[in-house]
């Protein structure tokens, strides 16, 4: 059976981990049991931190008093929101990417040149090619399906957005090019749309 309350040592000190399914009355009871069972484990005035779930002011006061009864100090820490990563600047490439070359970048990639057959472009964000694309292109490579691939002539050997993959038809040649296109995911499929720069 999983323990309702556990203690975990972290680089920020001791943390109290609680079963999120407990209601507040159950939490109080479980805390009393747990703390009573480890009275010899902690030195007096040891500080333990608990992530706010969020508790009301009254509940925080009750929890603090429970820990004080066992000569311990409770520090309730605000729930950590996942830090928003600063958006990366676009990687600008002012040349043609030759066959055999691979360009990987966590943000978006903008290429002023062609992507030749045998070249591979992998971006965490969007891919924008001011030229023709005949290589392998993978936008949203780290799972972001809201990304797109744009090219003046979009004729890649393989196109990927996040976990979705599409291949160019075998008869795709220059003469059938429809101008600048944008590849996006719609209804679980990669589709091409005309795009105005």
Image: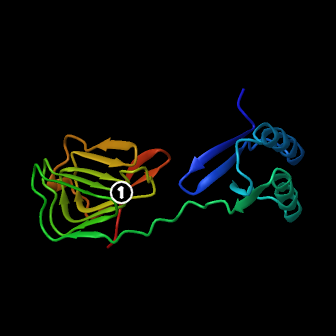
**Apparent side of residue 11 relative to residue 23 in the rendered image (left or right):** left
Tell me residue 117's x, y (percent). Answer: 13, 49
Determine whether, in the image, residue 169 is placed left or right of residue 58. left
The relative height of residue 128 versus residue 24 in the rendered view (above or below) is below
Residue at the image point whose x is 74% and y is 44% from the top: 20
Q: Is 89 on the left or on the right of 81, as rendered?
A: left
Screen quadrant of the C terminus: bottom left
Q: Secondary structure at mark 1?
A: loop
From the top left corner, tell me how far across and down residue 130 is, in percent. Answer: 22, 68
Q: Image point 38% across, 54% down: which residue?
A: 140
The image shows a total of numbered marks equal to 1
Side of 187 where 173 appears, left or right: left
Residue visible at 43% across and 49% down in the picture: 143
Q: Is 75 in front, or is 1?
A: 75
Asked where in the image residue 31 lies, by quadrant, the reply is top right
Q: Nearer the viewer, residue 145 or 155?
A: 145
Q: Position of residue 180 (x, y in %)?
A: 27, 64
Q: Which residue is mark 1?
A: 124
Task: Determine the image quadrant of residue 181.
Answer: bottom left
């Amino acid at each position: 059976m999983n323990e309702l309350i556990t203690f975990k040592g972290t680089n920020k000190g001791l943390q109290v981990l609680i079963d999120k399914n407990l209601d507040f009355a159950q939490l109080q009871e479980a805390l009393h049991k747990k703390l009573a069972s480890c009275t010899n484990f902690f030195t007096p005035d040891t500080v333990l931190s608990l992530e706010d779930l969020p508790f009301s002011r009254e509940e925080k006061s009750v929890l603090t008093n429970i820990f004080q009864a066992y000569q311990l100090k409770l520090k309730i820490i605000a729930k950590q929101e996942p830090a928003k990563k600063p958006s990366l600047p676009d990687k600008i490439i002012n040349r043609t990417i030759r066959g055999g070359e691979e360009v990987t970048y966590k943000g978006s990639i903008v290429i002023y040149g062609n992507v030749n057959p045998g070249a591979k472009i992998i971006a965490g964000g969007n891919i924008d090619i001011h030229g023709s694309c005949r290589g392998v292109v993978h936008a949203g490579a780290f799972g972001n399906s809201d990304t797109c691939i744009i090219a003046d002539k979009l004729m890649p050997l393989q196109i990927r957005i996040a976990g979705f993959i599409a291949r160019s038809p075998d008869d795709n040649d220059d003469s059938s090019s429809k101008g600048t296109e944008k590849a996006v995911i719609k209804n679980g499929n990669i589709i091409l749309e005309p795009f105005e720069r």
